[in-house]
Image: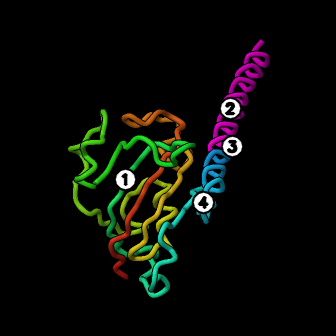
Amino acid sequence: MRPVILLCVAAVLAGCGDDLKKSLDDQNVAIIRYLDGRSLTYTIHNGVYRYIANADRDGYDAQTVAETGDEVWFDFEARLFSSTSGAGALFYTNKPELIGELEGAETLSWPVTVQKVRLGVDPLLGGVADAMPGCRTGDSLALFIPSNRAYGDRPMGVVPQNTTVVYVLNIRNVVKQ
């Protein structure tokens, strides 16, 4: 009787894995459709889609490039992904002018100041950490992060489990270390 129970448990778990894979596949397809549908040029970094909105600016190539170990100063908006508008409902930010948009989110736990992190040293959401190296001082970028590189199967505040998120970043400065 035990082998039958084990086979049933294995079948249920395999089904859950298939559902998660399909969900991730669906998330990736939705991100690609959104980006391609707007003819946005993007790169993929460990499963995170990075679009730099102002890569065509004067002096882009002369700007300091962020690498592991460097300090990066930035402003951000964390939003739920919307397949129609890209960046949907705001759930976290350090921009004082956007605090009024937050609905049901904890606004006191994150300072409303320019953020400074040391890449590869300070904790960051996995998808953000994966996509920041290679960014430059002055970049305005959007990171489209499938759930497996964001919060996964854990609901996080107003973010439901297995949800794609978008982080909109403005890189203020990169300080080489």
Q: Residue furthest top?
A: 1
Query: Could you say whether the residue bearing mark 4 is in a helix, strand or loop?
Result: loop
* Cα gap from disc 1 to disc 3, whole angstroms: 25 Å
Task: Please name the residue that numbered disc 4 is placed on.
Answer: 46
Specify the amino acid type for callout 1: Glu
Foreground: disc 1 or disc 4: 1
Residues at circles 4 and 2 in contact by the CB criterion of under 8 Å: no
* Cα gap from disc 3 to disc 4, whole angstroms: 15 Å
Foreground: disc 1 or disc 3: 1
Task: Please name the residue that numbered disc 1 is placed on.
Answer: 77
Task: Please name the residue that numbered disc 2 is placed on.
Answer: 19
Name the quadrant of the N terminus.
top right
Which residue is painted at 22% across and 53% down in the image?
Answer: 96
Q: Is residue 162 magenta?
A: no
Residue 46's place in the image compared with 67, above or below, is above
Q: Nearer the viewer, residue 146 or 13?
A: 146
Query: Could you say whether the residue bearing mark 3 is in a helix, strand or loop?
Result: helix
* Cα gap from disc 3 to disc 2, whole angstroms: 10 Å
Specify the amino acid type for callout 4: Asn
* Cα gap from disc 4 to disc 2, whole angstroms: 21 Å
Foreground: disc 3 or disc 4: 3
Specify the amino acid type for callout 2: Asp
